[in-house]
Image: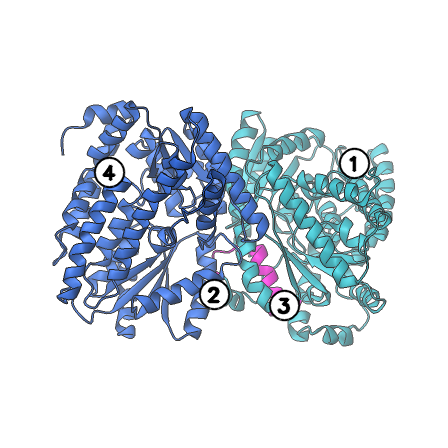
Chain colours: A cyan, B blue
Amino acid sequence: MADYTKMWTGLGLDLDNHDALLENLGGAYQSIFMSQKHRPEAMGYFDFVMSEAHGLRIKELREEQEAGRKIIGSFCVFVPEEIILAAGCTSVGLCSGADFAQEEVEKVLPRNTCSLIKSFFGFSLAKVCPYMEVSDLIVGENTCDGKKKAFETFKEMVPNFYQMDMPQNKAPMGRKLLTHEFKSFLAKLEEMTGKKITKKDLQEGIATVNAKRAALSRLAKLRAADPCPISGLDALLINQIAFLDNPARFTEKLNALCDELEVLVKEKKGAIAKNAPRILISGCPMAIPNWKVPAIIEATGAVIVGEESCIGERGQRNTTDDSADTLEGLIDAVVDRYFKIDCAVFTPNQERVEHIKEMTKNYNADGVIHYGLQFCQPYIMESFSVEKLLEKDGISIMRLETDYSQEDMGQLSTRVEAFVEIIK
Amino acid sequence: MADYTKMWTGLGLDLDNHDALLENLGGAYQSIFMSQKHRPEAMGYFDFVMSEAHGLRIKELREEQEAGRKIIGSFCVFVPEEIILAAGCTSVGLCSGADFAQEEVEKVLPRNTCSLIKSFFGFSLAKVCPYMEVSDLIVGENTCDGKKKAFETFKEMVPNFYQMDMPQNKAPMGRKLLTHEFKSFLAKLEEMTGKKITKKDLQEGIATVNAKRAALSRLAKLRAADPCPISGLDALLINQIAFLDNPARFTEKLNALCDELEVLVKEKKGAIAKNAPRILISGCPMAIPNWKVPAIIEATGAVIVGEESCIGERGQRNTTDDSADTLEGLIDAVVDRYFKIDCAVFTPNQERVEHIKEMTKNYNADGVIHYGLQFCQPYIMESFSVEKLLEKDGISIMRLETDYSQEDMGQLSTRVEAFVEIIK
């Protein structure tokens, strides 16, 4: 990596903290990803993106900013990238997947807060996240109680916070609320950029995001093969990078990877051995560098064939209908697409369990591991009914509850090994 | 108490479990309430209500039912009693304040769920709550993630569940949502009773509830005196009974108590000694028989002078404007009144800290104890900013986090004693 010290200093990063983070991250990446055998060649691009996640990609974002583009950071797949692109802005994900500055975090947040929230607080307090620092606007949303209430504190920590309200159910009033919030967000971006969003702008935004989602869906489907042409770890990584990379380039590179995977599937070549136990992961999102549970699962010789998660299929399924011939109609289509997301903050949320069953079938999974972040009430509460309904259908499921610490690695390994043993 | 075995059996209560609960409850009541010295005479009525909470009051509700009245049970001060009364129905509170059947509960709910939710699940699973069993309709609301998601399971456990959506902020769209939900609830009650609600019905409902809230407000203000004419425990009990008793009779008896307290204040007679350290409690609601923390506080010789709580002033402040001359206008006035409730599920919720400061001043409190139920994310998250803002104003505050168990009594006592020592 080139010397980005000047850029990082300019962004206000704490260089000592940041060095410590990068060192940790690099070590984890080497041991988890680079030690895998039989990786597709086209993963080289994604390895490169990861190695330059705090370097070249940030430089690109800075250059975009210098050219007048605004960078919009967010924490949730409900923030519509189509509208961000239509406004001539760039979207970046700010969720983070590692403990940092825990002691400082627990001065402002309860100990019993989920790791994902604590993590982005830690990244902000310790000044180690260049994506957060480069963002011109940081968008929070009223999804779960944890984020909703934590944002009250977070918005005092950053100079540029914008809050988006969220419905709690899928009734017509809920849809009205989401429409209202998407329109307010669009107006906010117009105000920031001083530019009206046209029908053509939104069409282009939709086209870019649809292409990205189509490529991610192509990747998802290729994992149905046995042997699986790509590891679950690599597929998760791609889904994580989808929140950081330039969307058009990402789509092109992902399609190139899929071309390679198609050949591998035809040749019956796998990243993981044929007849490996096949696991579907379902539950809370796993943000970079939260690779703990997938690494444990694939270390047993099993392969993860899908992620029913925001960083995964829940967040990326469904493209947006681009056929409307007015701006209003296109906005409606965007709302339609997002209103389908089956996040556990909605009540009821029966579609989710149907999707889990569907994914289990489509990707030939032998069992489901439900991944719950400790203190994430929506997903952990919902995991009880998910378990009941899957078991009713004869689908094996194990519920895990963990955080970002490494302390429970041994215990998790034992449980995962036992589960993998049972399902095969 | 008369023999209500037949009635309890008829309601489907589990008599063994119910006996065990009543025995526990009776013992706690004796040791906590009846051991207090210098109680106002008029507390006799409230002692009687408590002694007959599962007897005579349930008999009354059964008689109301036989006369064609519907009983509406609910878990939240956002369920509008005015509308329930207007529909010719009776409102009862279903929140509960004791652990019961914990092992059964943890089969359907995560261990990391707040005690209040676990408690009403336990009361339902063990069949010990006659109010739950007598209810013709049980209303749940989308307030916190915990209740919202737990209700998905709960509605499968009871035959008559109705869900009310809730806004998450106080923006105009939030008010629209609450209006929509109140109107849907009104329509649901009309459908159940087969009777249209008229302007006169709602005026009468508003008058009854306004009179109750005025009496509760009268009680609250009398506690500003030093010596305090009534203990915090007795005042809390009255606020708890407000959710169970016949509202008109309750109001009459509470006003009689207030008449007595006015005399006591004039004569400078107190339930607790003059110059006792004065505590304001703020935070999560305390449902019957959750008297743990107030008992600990008053055992130190301090007096609780107010409850900033749903079971207390947050739930009962503000009457409803009855001046509108249309049904629509009156419904709007009801929405206005409820939309002011400063529950921590709203974001932002600055009004609450202003109310805490106001109550501290009005009731001459020496310090605030913030009562957080473990795993109640909204109140515990908010307690961090509440603490910061009160300390900025020089108001002493201590944050407690506890559950319904008795295991931390010693530790809580030590902390409360130290706090009381400091503030005086």
Where is residue B307 drawn, in percent x and y? 32, 57
Residues at marks 3 and 2, CA–CA distance in whole angstroms: 16 Å
- Residue of label 1: A222
Q: Nearer the viewer, residue B179 or B23?
A: B179
The subunit carrying tag 3 is A
- The mark closer to the camera, 2 or 1, is 2
For label 1, count other residues whose C-alpha is less than 10 Å away and answer few (under 14), some (14-19) or many (20+): some
Per the image, is B306 magenta?
Answer: no
**Residue A9 in the image, given as x and y percentages of width and height:** 73, 76
Which residue shows up at 66% across the image and 56% down it? A289
Q: Which residue is mark 4?
A: B21
- Mark 4: amino acid: Leu
Name the residue carrying label 2.
B385
Q: What residue is shown with label 3? A: A158
Apparent side of residue B173 relative to residue B2 in the rendered image (left or right): right
Q: CA distance from mark 2 to mark 1?
A: 49 Å
Chain letter of disc 1 in the image: A
Give the distance between the C-alpha atoms of the residues marked 4 and 2, in whole angstroms: 38 Å
Name the kind of residue labelled 1 in the image: Leu
Task: Report the span colored magenta.
Answer: A110-128
Q: SS at mark 3? A: loop
Residue drawn at (40%, 30%) of the image: B137
